[in-house]
Image: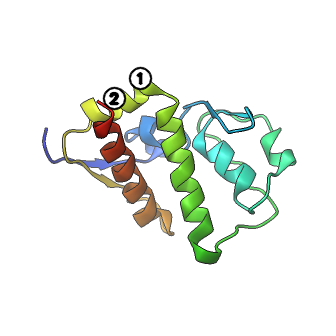
C-alpha cells in the first residue's frame, strides 16, 4: 500500500481511529488530561482555557461545543488543531506506529463529509502527522 486514499469520519466508522473524536488520551503542559483531540480543541478554541467545557463528561465520539466562540484570527484555530493532533499522536506511540504502518507510505487523507474548513485542513494535518511519525521510526 504505497499511495492510498483514506477517508476519516467518526460517525460512519471510516478510519474512526484517526478522527479528532477518537479516544487518544493525552495531556497538555499543565498535566490536564484530554480524552480526545476534540475535547482539547473545544476547551481552547476561544483562545483561552474553558473550564466548563474541560470538566464536561467527555467520551469518544462526543462533541460538546463551547459558548465562547472560536478564535480565527491568523488561523489560530487551525494551528491549535494541528498542535493537538500532533500531541495526541506523540503521546500515543502505539497509535503513531499504526499511523505509519496501516496507512501506507504516501497516503492521501480525506474528510469528505465535512462542509467547512476541516474538509481541507484536517487531511492536511493528518498528512503532517504521518510525515512526522515516519521520521520517528
Across and down, in percent, residue 78 comes to: 55, 63
Residue drawn where x is 47% and y is 61% of the image: 114
Viewer-proximal residue among 36 and 87: 87
Asked if one can make out residue 104 in the rendered structure from this viewpoint, the answer is: yes
Q: Which residue is mark 2?
A: 98
Screen quadrant of the N terminus:
top left
Report the label total: 2
Asked if one can make out residue 111 in the rendered structure from this viewpoint, the answer is: no
Mark 1 and mark 2 in contact (Cβ < 8 Å)? yes
Residue 37, quarter of the rendered image: top right
Q: Single out the residue that lies furthest toward the bottom.
A: 73
Q: Single out the residue that lies furthest toward the right.
A: 52
Q: Is residue 6 left or right of residue 11?
A: left
Crowdedness of circle 2 by 10 Å Cα count: few (<14), some, many (20+)? some
36, above or below 76, in the image = above
Viewer-proximal residue among 26 and 56: 26
Q: Is residue 55 left or right of residue 105?
A: right
67, above or below 51, in the image = below
Across and down, in percent, residue 95 comes to: 42, 28
Q: Single out the residue that lies furthest toward the top.
A: 94
3, above or below 102, in the image = below
Across and down, in percent, residue 52 comes to: 86, 47
Q: Is residue 51 left or right of residue 95?
A: right
Residue drawn where x is 48% and y is 34% of the image: 90
Secondary element under disc 2, as helix, strand or loop, is helix
Residue drawn where x is 55% and y is 61% of the image: 79
Q: Which residue is mark 1?
A: 94
Q: Is residue 90 left or right of residue 45?
A: left
Secondary element under disc 1, as helix, strand or loop, is helix
Residue drawn where x is 38% and y is 59% of the image: 124
Screen quadrant of the C terminus:
top left
Alpha carbon distance from label 2 to label 1: 6 Å
Amino acid at each position: 500500500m504505497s499511495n492510498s486514499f483514506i477517508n476519516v469520519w467518526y460517525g460512519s466508522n471510516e478510519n474512526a481511529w484517526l478522527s479528532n473524536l477518537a479516544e487518544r488520551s493525552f495531556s497538555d503542559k499543565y498535566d490536564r488530561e484530554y480524552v480526545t483531540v476534540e475535547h482539547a480543541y473545544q476547551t481552547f478554541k476561544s483562545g483561552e482555557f474553558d473550564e466548563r467545557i474541560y470538566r464536561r463528561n467527555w467520551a469518544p465520539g462526543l462533541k460538546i461545543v463551547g459558548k465562547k466562540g472560536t478564535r480565527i484570527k491568523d488561523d489560530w484555530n487551525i494551528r491549535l488543531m494541528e498542535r493537538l493532533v500532533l500531541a495526541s499522536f506523540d503521546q500515543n506511540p502505539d497509535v503513531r506506529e499504526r499511523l505509519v504502518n496501516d496507512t501506507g507510505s504516501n497516503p492521501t487523507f480525506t474528510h469528505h463529509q465535512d462542509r467547512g474548513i476541516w474538509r481541507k485542513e484536517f487531511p492536511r494535518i493528518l498528512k503532517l502527522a504521518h510525515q512526522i511519525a515516519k521520521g520517528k521510526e
